[in-house]
Image (tube, rainbow, N blue to C red):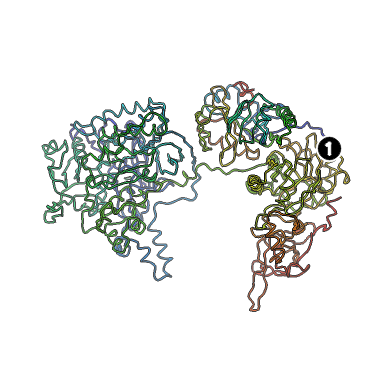
Amino acid sequence: MNTSKTPVKLTPLHSAAQRLGATFIEQRGWRIPQVYTTLEDEVVAAQERLTLADETSNGKLLLEGDQAESVLMDTFDLGSLKINEGHDGIYRLRSDLFFISTPPGREISIRKKLTTASAASEQFVTITEVTHGRAEIRVIGPHSQELLSKVCGLDFHPSAFPNETAKQSSLAKTTQLIIRCDIGELPAFSIIGVQSLGPYVWDTMMEAGTEFGVVPIGRAALAALGEE
Amino acid sequence: MRTEQDALTTTSNRLHPKQGEVIDRSTTIRFTFDGVEYTAHPGDTVASALTAAGVKVLSRSFKYHRPRGLLCCSGHCPNCLVQIGDEPNVRACTRPVEPGMEVRAQNVWPSLNRDLLSLTQLGSRFMPVGFYYKTFIRPQKLWPLYEHTLRHAAGLGEVDIDTPLGEFDKQYLHTDVVIVGGGPAGISAALSAAETGAQVLLFEENPALGGHLRFTVPLESSSTTKASKDLPELLEAVDRQPNITVFTDTSVLGWYQDNWLCAVKGARLFKIRTKSVVVATGAYETPLIFDNNDLPGVMLGSAVQRLVHLFGVLPGGQVVIVTANEDGWDVAADLQSLGVNVAAIVDEREPSACASPYREGLTNAGVPVFYRHTILEALGSNEVRGAKIARLDGQGEISLATAQSLQCDLIVTSMGWTPATELAYMAGGKSEYHEDRAEILPVSTPPGIYVVGRAAGTHAVNSQISEAQRAGSNAAAFVGFGEFDESTAYSSGVLEPRRTSERVCVPGKKKQFVCYCEDVTDEDVETAIAEGYDSIELLKRYSTISMGPCQGAMCSMNTIHLCARANDWTVQETGTTTARPPTTPVTLGALAGQNMEPVQTTPIHQWHLDHGADMMVAGLWLRPNHYGDPAAEATSVRERVGLIDVSPLGKLQLTGPGVPELLERIYTNQWDNLRVGRVRYGVMCNDEGVVLNDGVCAHVNDETWYMTTTSTGATTIFEWLQWWLQSGWGEGIHLTDLTDTYSAFNLAGPQSRTVLEKLTERNLANKAFPYMRLRSAKIAGVSCRLLRIGFTGELSYEVHCPSGYALHVWEALMDAGREFDIAPFGVEAQRILRLEKAHIIVGQDTDAMSDPLSANMAWAVKLDKPDFLGKPSLMRISAEGPKQLLVGFKMVEPNVVPDEGLQIVESEADGQLKIVGWITSSRFSPTLEEAIGLCWLPPDIASQNGASFTIRMDGHLAEARVHHGAFYDPDGERLRM
Ligand code: FES
Ligand code: FES
């Protein structure tokens, strides 16, 4: 058997990042953009203008079932969530469907925990990992709302779309899950959709963001901004 | 007061600098109009710069090619439409000049000033209203000639089809209150709404807020005095108010249900969701209909004021003002103060009715005033040289005996206003004709819609402001901010003195234009009504009045009056036409927005490109069609090994105890006996028994099934299953779309097992892993699902791996296959291979009528199952027998490949050819070295192996023979190796 190369996971935006001149690091088995230009420039762009980051490596789980909420409550210290509401990376999309976003790699342990809890509860609950199936693009910066208002019909004003809210909507004519996840005071949204459309959504947002001076940022800038 | 000397520069119609003007005189820019170079200042519009240079004729009319000049100067008429570069129908009076701009007159031949097409006027009796229904229709054979000539003469502007795509886009906006119109009323409404805490969007179609206060003069005692002085204050307050967002140069095009508004600013379209709307859109000044009323040099009063105050340009030096209200006197005083020779004021009213504060001053200054007079005709051929006026008798009739001519180069009409209330009516507002005001005014609007200012008939600025403040707070209160102010919304205007004359038309003998856009005269209106098109809606459709670029802004009110008069109805009885979006013309580019065409790519996309793939579009997917030589790719699969990226296949996960029952219901064959680790092929039908999709489904473990669908049908089938799950079949079932979670590759060919064995420890021997089985295995270190299935007809493994590892696994397979000369293969090779096996492709070999019994898939239909989707229809088809059958064929001439879609024909007794079938798939088989295919045929032919039939080729007939079973390896031995 020949397995000479160590398997490495690539995000659907890998080619786009290469074209944009990214340097890469490997983290939890994923090859992800570390920096595109300079750390300083990318941080300033995020703080003052508009940036896009590839966060596909974040873990993503779907939990489905009429009893999904009670399984979640048994597993985590979690109160009841309304539809579209989220807490600590857990978002309720329907009465019987939850989306769980985790830092890269942590989806494995969370999935195990949930599997154990659901087995113990003897409830019919399905836990599916979709990390590989969904591209995740983070839009960060003061112009985030304006950019999204060019590609999506939702109201992104904080009064209508508060932090830790998740909504499914059409974005640039594709179906996406949009989660508001500000970084401190800095408006930020995660755009999560099927990976095969990831490059298209990325390119469309880069084009729509030109007027706001959009640039891509890497892992280093995200870390500097205070993201794990 | 300035002297004439002070006011006019000597070299052009440009006035000396004055406060409020929007041009930057420190810079001069150049542009051309019809090849002649002109100068302008930044801030100038094309029209203001041309007027400053003395140009009066800007365009030719639509039908008669009459010369036309500035009329409204506000973007609300057709008279200044020009071509700028490759952009047709630009309004010269609103488009700012840019350095080097190339402006051309449109719709003229050979030139603007000598447009020979104006000779059409001589034949105007052949072109009455609705002429296209009446004349030029006989003799029929001459129609192509008529059409060519008419098309050449009509139309506006030229579209250059080579123009590159523009940078259009759109934006969604959400707010509490939208204010449409940024005049004093709009600003005041915005401020009071915003003060309550409501979020306000304020839209203004002009480049700056201020409305008419930007170009009306704050002379003492004028009704505008106080407010004009307050304008800077109002603007500052808007600047300071964080809850107001201002959009200038933005036209609101329409109101749609639930306060969904559409607006456009240049190349950007806004879609706005608001909770309440204040319509403060002002009013259009209404033109007067008289002989030659379209002659360049006949202008509306507000147009002249715009030119003078915003651009410092005088459109004439000797002016006759025709009026019926105080606004005309305002214009006269304004012009006179600038040193213009006001040759006469012609006021149709009695002297006692005139309450203008300027009356005394103008009279004392020696301006001739003709009370109880009106204008009969604009004199001149290409531009105004004079005005013929006459006295009105006691009944208001013209006394022709009193007619006299006055010399002038500018005729200004100020006869009244048409409230711009289209948006309020689109929103369901109701209107009424106020006889005493001679205006149609809104009387009610739906909750949350408010109309203020001139749009509500309120002309006095202070009344506009107070009324708008009230409406602004009510609009905010409607949304939940602050309290309602209960006083009535539309009271102010109706208490004011009349500003609008009922006299819309002065009868005459020459051409008098009602609708400038469509070149419709008063005579045309009379003719149309006499022909029976008497209702206002019919009249509009027949005459095309109000259907031109201005959308009725200049003509709708006058038409209603003329229609009422001709029918002897009241204006109220006559009614109005229905208001519809867009209120102003909009480019198709702006409506289309940013070019967003979703494209799906697989994780191997870049690899395909790097290896010379010729990509094709399949649904939204981009897939390699081939890598240079599809026949060689097919041969490599047959003889060695090939690898195809089938990631777009739909992949659905079904979990739960209810799944077997669901599968029984949605597939036509049997499923409840499928054991874990096994894979089965299935066909899905709709209620009518029509084939919807096909694919395999694997039983993964006790509670999990893994279903694949066709690539282009993945989303449809997912949604379709969801629909059934939500319609009562969902008990104990969860459905998840894993199409993107897993990427899939088909490793096919006699060497595929050997290649795969190099990458896994899993026993792949035929016994351990037979045909139509599922196994999980680590391939090149990655946990994958392997399905042993064979669309290509060879030993093959479908490798499903998590998409993040796709490139790693693909490259490992290619590396492992190198020693066997592995080749990637594309969709085209796959199509050849499957055709050699006579496997159908749903959607290509089947259509919206095809059932599986007829489509050679009867083996996959179990009519003795209790129930499944499509069963009743299939039972009927089975009992009656299929009308057509899908069957394989070979060509008698092995090198002739008939195109897909060609007809299969049969000779009838009379020698005519009857269509009896058609080709759905055809290829030259590199394995068999002959042309093969699939086709639909009547059962009597299809059921005989070897039966011959005829294909209608391009210009000749070709013979083919029915072929039963697969063309290649009919017993499927190679699949089971
Ligand atoms: S003069 Fe330009 S639109 Fe009327
Ligand atoms: S004048 Fe424009 S549509 Fe009639």
* Count of marks, rendered view: 1
Q: Secondary structure at mark 1?
A: loop
Q: Position of residue B86 (x, y in %)?
A: 44, 47
Q: Position of residue B260 (x, y in %)?
A: 45, 41
Residue A88, quarter of the rendered image: top right
Query: Ligand 1 closer than 8 Å to the CB at disc 1?
Result: no
Residue type highlighted by circle 1:
Thr
Which quarter is ligand 1 in? Answer: top left
Residue B630 visible in the picture: yes
Q: Is residue A148 left or right of residue B571?
A: right
In the figure, B395 relative to B4: above or below? Answer: below
Q: Position of residue B560 (x, y in %)?
A: 29, 53
Q: Nearer the viewer, residue B568 or B4?
A: B568
In the figure, B37 relative to B873: above or below? Answer: above
- Give the labeled residue for mark 1: B760
Q: Is residue B175 left or right of residue A90?
A: left
